[in-house]
Image (cartoon, grey):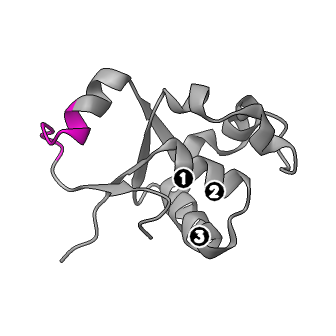
Amino acid sequence: MTRPKNFFWDSCCFIRFITRYPELLADMEQYIKEARDGSIAIHFCTVAFAEIRPRYFKESSYGSIEEFFDHWGSAFVPIDPGLFNALFFGLSAWGDFSLFRSGSV
């Protein structure tokens, strides 16, 4: 089976990355590197901006969600909640699409 080129990260993935969750960090860094290189795309629902709370940045090198996306933003493709619902419920014509949730690595 070929590896998907499109991935979806929910807010839990971002929280795990921001808080440097050890079991997932190396894999997540590799995905981000590949996304920045253009070999894959990591999509996320814009609702994540509301779900990623300021407390997650207390021990982070980023002071806010804005700083995080200023630094890493080129690796992520925002999608609106309407498209997210279509993808989540399998109504997508996007082809290979992998849901990457923080517990599924």
Count up the numbered dots: 3
Query: CA–CA distance between discs 3 and 2?
Result: 8 Å
Q: Dot 2, crowdedness within 10 Å: few (<14), some or many (≥20)?
A: some
> Residue at the spot x=57%, y=62% of the render?
33
Residue position for label 1: 13
Which secondary structure type mostly characterizes the magenta part of the structure? loop
Q: Quadrant of the C terminus?
A: bottom left
Q: Which kind of residue does numbered mark 3 sit on?
A: Leu
Q: Which kind of residue does numbered mark 1 sit on?
A: Cys
Q: Quadrant of the N terminus?
A: bottom left
Q: Dot 3, crowdedness within 10 Å: few (<14), some or many (≥20)?
A: some
Residue 102 picture location, percent across and down = 50, 59
On screen, residue 89 versus residue 58, left or right, reads left
Picture quadrant where residue 99 is located = bottom left
**Dots 3 and 2: beta carbons under 8 Å?**
yes
Name the residue nearer the viewer: 46 or 89.
89
Query: CA–CA distance between discs 1 and 2?
Result: 5 Å
> Residue at the spot x=23%, y=38% of the render?
87
Q: Which kind of residue does numbered mark 2 sit on?
A: Arg
Q: Which residues are magenta?
A: 86-94
On screen, residue 44 versus residue 92, left or right, reads right
> Residue at the spot x=59%, y=25% of the render?
50
Find out whether residue 9 is within the magenta segment.
no
